[in-house]
Image (tube, rainbow, N blue to C red):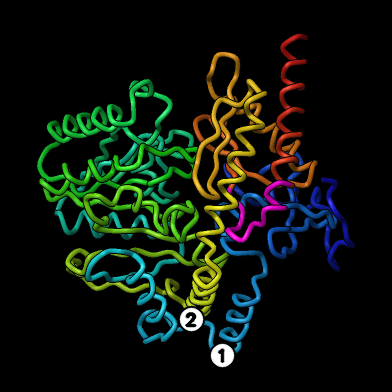
Amino acid sequence: MSPGSEPPPPGGAPATHLHARHRAVMPDWLALYYREPLELTHGEGRHVWDSAGRRYLDFFGGILTTMTAHALPEVTKAVTEQAARILHTSTLYLDRHMVELAERIAALSGIPDARVFFTSSGTEATDAALLLATAHRRSNQILAMRNSYHGRSFSAVGVTGNSAWSPTSLSPLQTLYVHGAVRTRGPYAALSDAEFTAACVADLEDVLGQAHGNVAALIAEPVQGVGGFTSPPDGLYAAFREVLARRGILWISDEVQTGWGRTGDHFWGWQAHAASGPPDLLTFAKGIGNGMSIGGVVARAEVMNSLGANSISTFGGSPVTMAAGLANLTHLLEHDLQGNARRVGGLLIERLRAVAASLPLVREVRGRGLMIGVELAGPDGSPSPEAAALTLEHAREGGLLIGKGGREAGTLRIAPPLSLTVAEAEEGAAVLETALHRTHSALAGEERA
């Protein structure tokens, strides 16, 4: 499609000027998409507008955060009304919205006798979960998955198995990385699903045999987010759970990107691995706030209550964010957006697989629901970050915003709001098809030259 347009907002400055100011005061490592970065000024539904008035179909949702829709009336109303009453109190005081949202999340989590602690982000949720697990088990040893990502804090980086997002080897934790989260690469890729699972369980047993003393927990994303939307066969973490439970090792399911029905088939990603029961801890963030800063941890009471010191949260669970989260979750459930993610996501992934069939540039289209990865590769089969970056540019020119990630940032990440319509899915797929063909032609021309 051709991007729509409307007058820029009053006082809007050219994005090029803002980019120069950004570079003068922000860290060099703070990434920006596109050769000419965008300033997004407003949104509605599944669309956003930039400071030049151009309209885009949003297939990335602020990194999987705009879960229901941009400017969702129920959330906007809840935020406005609560902000007019009181903005902030802290966890030192009772908050009705916090209690109500915690009750709903505890009931939805599937964890028995659940307790909920709210934070301001997914990174903080990871920190809290690691604190709880290591304190409960009296061990700083953590199992994590290769190719994983759990946040940008010191402890979260210490359990991140993706070198592109791990700027230091220093850590308060001893982390042991195991196989299993990437199905189609690595030493077990050629195995059947059952053989793959068995091999990964054997690897887990071998790693545990070399660990010293108690291991505190395994932390794992059911579908890896920054890792490029990779995932193991269904049931792998259930098989891991059997091994862990025999040793008293806790299982932390990182649901920051997979939670709230995004995968379509399940409300939580861990439910694809439910044969051995729910996780001991579950972390969440992003989509529940629909853009407001909400994160948190759900844990069995025995684990959550095991801290031997006081703790509070100044900003976690603020009145405004809790009101927004309640309104957003209510809308999600009442409109069956999980079902919509399953139906529309299924159509979208099949449409993209049809596009990929004629493009050697595309190595794999994977995912479930509205969490889809398109891995691009060079002639030797290795990930192509160049192709991914170029496709992002071409998609933007066609009026579509997508993300990227995965090994060497060679995978396109597609995760629109869960209210995406069939017509919008078709529209976005058509733009992406054109973008991929343009990228293929551009790279083929370079090879010939």
Residue 148 as seen in the image, left or right of residue 217? right
User: What secondary structure is marked by label 1?
Assistant: helix
Residue 72 visible in image: yes
Quadrant position of the N terminus in the picture: top right
Marks 1 and 2 in Cβ contact (< 8 Å): yes
Query: Given the image, on which type of amino acid does mark 1 rest?
Result: Arg
Q: Which residue is drawn at 79% across and 51% down?
A: 15
Circle 1: is it few (<14), some (14-19), or many (20+) Cα within 10 Å? few
Q: Earlier in the sequence, mark 1 or mark 2?
A: 1
Query: Which residue is located at x 16 percent, y 33 percent?
Result: 205
Instruction: Give the x, y percent position of residue 226.
Output: 49, 42
Q: What label does residue 75 carry, if any?
A: none
Q: Which residue in the protein does label 2 denote? A: 319
- Where is residue 137? Give x, y as percent: 15, 54
Quick one: SS at disc 2?
Answer: helix
Q: Does the magenta stretch include residue 419?
A: yes
Number of other residues with Cα within 10 Å of mark 2, as a class: few under 14, some 14 to 19, many 20 or more:
many
Q: What stretch is highlighted in magenta?
A: 415-426
Q: Mark 1 points at which residue?
A: 85
* Residue type beneath disc 2: Pro
